[in-house]
Structures are given as C-alpha cells and as structure tokens.
Image (spheres, rainbow, N blue to C red):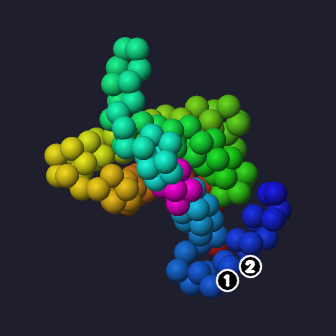
Amino acid sequence: MRKTIEGVLDFFYPFFRRFMDKTTFRYAACGGANTVFDILLFFVSYHFILRKQMVELSFLVVSPHIAAFLMAFLISFPVGFLLMRFIVFQDSYLKGRIQLFRYFLSVCVSLFLNYVFLKILVERMHFFPTVSKIITTFFVVGFSYMAQKHFSFKTPKTSID
C-alpha cells in the first residue's frame, strides 16, 4: 500500500515541483486526502448515522454536529498519523511512540480549534454544519502543518550547499 501511494504521489509531483518541495507536496496531498475523507465521514455521520439528532449519553447530551465530528475523528486520526509517518515525514529521527504522542498533542490542539470554530459557526452564526466544518478546516490546516513538520515528525536540519 505504501509503495502504491508513493508511486501515485511521485507521478504527480513533477507538476508541483516549481511551487513546493516534495515533503510539502506529500503533506498537502496526504493531508488533503485525509481531510476530504474526514469531511465525508462527518457528512455521512451527521446526515445518515445520527440523522441530525442529539446524542443522549447517560451523563451528557451531545449536539449532532459535535458527535459527527468526533465520530469522523476516531477514523481519520489513525489514518492521518499513518500517512504522515510512513509517507510524508519518513526522515524523522523520532521514535514511533514519540511521534504518535506528539501527533496526538498537536491533534488535540486541532480538535480544540475545530470544536471552538464549529460551536461559533453553527450555534452562534447559524452556518450549515458541513459548510462550517469546511471553513474550520482551512483555519486548522496551517497550524497542523507547522506543528507536524516542526514538532511531531521533526527531521534533521539539512544545509543548502
């Protein structure tokens, strides 16, 4: 699977070489694919699994857009980590468990940002939930890239000759 993904990315990279380095391209492609996957999971969860209904737990009632967000996260988190570790940041010198912990920390901040933006956009500004999720994603992507590149999957510094 890894070789297939790398092969597809390497096929398309020459079209983007003028605009970004290979790591940034792989991050954009893998992160973009995982983001689309996450939004699709959110949409399906919200509309078809939860049917836009509140989720009543024994100790808490969760709004459907937040529940759908959490359901999508449970699937997109491990997929995203595996893509980042094995496809994008292969040169990281950190051990896998350190990467996973740091990835988890950066994703927790992203989760918090997602939660806050969704609450504001859906409940305060009355935007549609799926549109709100897309808008939120654009704000969180910049933070996520920097956190993963410089924290979660740190790579050795290279000098430019």
Horizontal placement of 136 versus 17: left or right?
left
> Residue lying furthest left in this view?
124
> Residue lying furthest top in this view?
59
- Residue 37 forms part of the magenta stretch: yes
Horizontal placement of 55 versus 19: left or right?
left
Would you name the residue on which mark 2 appears? 11
Q: Is residue 141 above or below residue 73?
A: below
What residue lies at 52% left-to-right and 56% top-to-bottom? 40
Instruction: Report the front residue among 47 and 132.
Output: 47
What residue lies at 68% left-to-right and 31% top-to-bottom? 97
Q: Position of residue 94 (x, y in %)?
A: 67, 39
- What segment carries the magenta color? 35-41
Which residue type does callout 2 highlight? Phe
What residue lies at 66% left-to-right and 58% top-to-bottom? 88
**Circle 1: element type:** helix
Looking at the rendered image, the quarter that the N terminus falls into is bottom right
Q: In the rendered picture of this protein, how many numbered marks are placed on residues? A: 2
Q: Quadrant of residue 134?
A: bottom left
Q: Main secondary structure of the magenta part?
A: helix
- Residue 36 forms part of the magenta stretch: yes
**Circle 2: element type:** helix
Instruction: Tell me the CA gap for discs 2 and 1.
Output: 7 Å
What residue lies at 16% left-to-right and 46% top-to-bottom? 124
